[in-house]
Image (cartoon, rainbow, N blue to C red):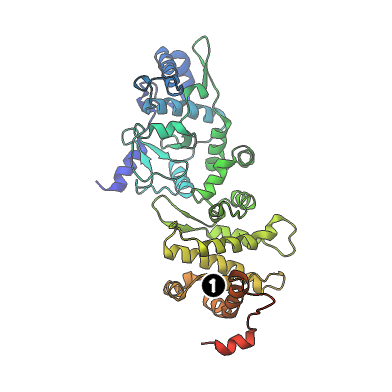
Amino acid sequence: MQTSNIFTIILLLIACNSMGQDNSMNTINKQYTNSQNLVENIKKHIKLQEKIESDEVEYDDSYNLNVEDLKLASSIIYDDLISNGYIEPKAESFNNKIETIFSISHSSNKCVSIDQTNGYITVFGNHLDGNPGTLEQSKYELYSTTQNTFINTNNQFIFPILLLKELININGDNSFKIKVPRYIIARNMYLFNDSKPQFKWLILNDQSFMESLVKTFGYTKDPDLLKWVIERTKFDEKDPRNFGKLFWVKVCNGKFKLHADTFKLLQKLHIPNDPSENRFIIDNIKSYLEFLGRDKSTDLTRNEKLKLMANLAYFAEQYNYDKKFNDDNKMMARLRYFLNDDDFKVIKENNFFSLPKFKELWDSADYDAYYVGECEYEGSCGSGYQPMDYAEWRKQHPKK
């Protein structure tokens, strides 16, 4: 059987049907009040889960979260989502959204962690795990942070695994009162119901998750979200890579993805005589380009890094030639300073990364590269030394 077919079968498995109760999630409250077995099961798991919280619990007596905990949490959360107005999307629409937002391909299981028995897909908070694994294998990581997110592929929603006591109160008559955190409802209604009110709530109350959509998973298709993330992200010398997350990401299969949407939106945000913080867009890009030029780490391959730097310089260079902007950033010249002939050869072999005027701008920046190198990066300009003027330098470096 082909991998894609196996994956399709996995997606169709329902995680909550094996609870031994009514298969319809819409009758979950009736199950809570009418099924003594389910009541006792939930009580039992609440008691068991107490053993994973206390440092006083001996290792041999500790409790590890398992698939049953996941089923119970999923059931409770789904019921509360529906009662709060969540509209369960069609499977095709949901799958497309998951792929767009989290870069998860539904034709392959290489980018997600799957419980092969119960059909759960796990999206990890800081990255997408590259190795298939079960909930049991991931138990410690699952409990360590609520950023780990599961995808229920039958009822079309996402959720973190929480302790049952964080989701419900048990009344004296064995009925339940659900207390699912609002951020779970808001995330699903924003991502899969396109709820603008929930978006506004999330950017005020769930900022880490909202930033992670862009900076961790590379989701740039919502211009309101992307604008919000851009305007709260400045270049910081203490954390230069954070600014870079606006422009690129390596998705779960390791593929480099450049954010064209970011460049398009920056072009709209950067306007002449802008009094807002957006007037520093080019300055921030300049600082990040210089960081990339000096950085020797292996976050990116040579081709990926050259593509990123070429796009940054190309975007910023346009403002040198626009009289509406008082801009003399010499970004293409800075790019030339940091690159060598072999680097340019790679860029040329890649058809200048499909940037139509790149070669023209590159050639025009040869003197400026010399000038910024001498005066800014080498620090040799001063009262005792001045670089050659353009005419003198051109005599020694005639255009080819």
In x, y percent, where is residue 297? 45, 58
Q: Residue furthest top?
A: 173
Callout 1: SS: helix
Q: Residue at x 44, y 59 (%)?
A: 300
In x, y percent, where is residue 299? 44, 56
In x, y percent, where is residue 282? 64, 63
Q: Residue at x 46, y 21 (%)?
A: 54
Q: Residue furthest bottom?
A: 395
Q: Residue furthest front?
A: 384
Q: Is residue 218 above or below residue 44?
A: below
Q: Quadrant of residue 320?
A: bottom right
Q: Is residue 242 above or below residue 203?
A: below
Query: Mark 1 packing: few (<14 Cα in 10 Å), some, or many (20+)?
Result: many
- Comparing 387 with 357, the one in front is 387
Answer left or right for 67 relative to 279.
Answer: left
Instruction: Name the residue tied to disc 1.
Output: 337
Q: Quadrant of residue 47?
A: top left
Q: How many marks?
A: 1
Whether residue 167 is visible: no
- Comparing 147 with 261, the one in front is 147
Amino acid carrying mark 1 in the image: Tyr
Answer left or right for 16 relative to 311.
Answer: left
In x, y percent, where is residue 133? 33, 38
Q: Is residue 23 above or below residue 227?
A: above
Whether residue 10 is visible: yes
Q: Is residue 156 above or below residue 2?
A: above
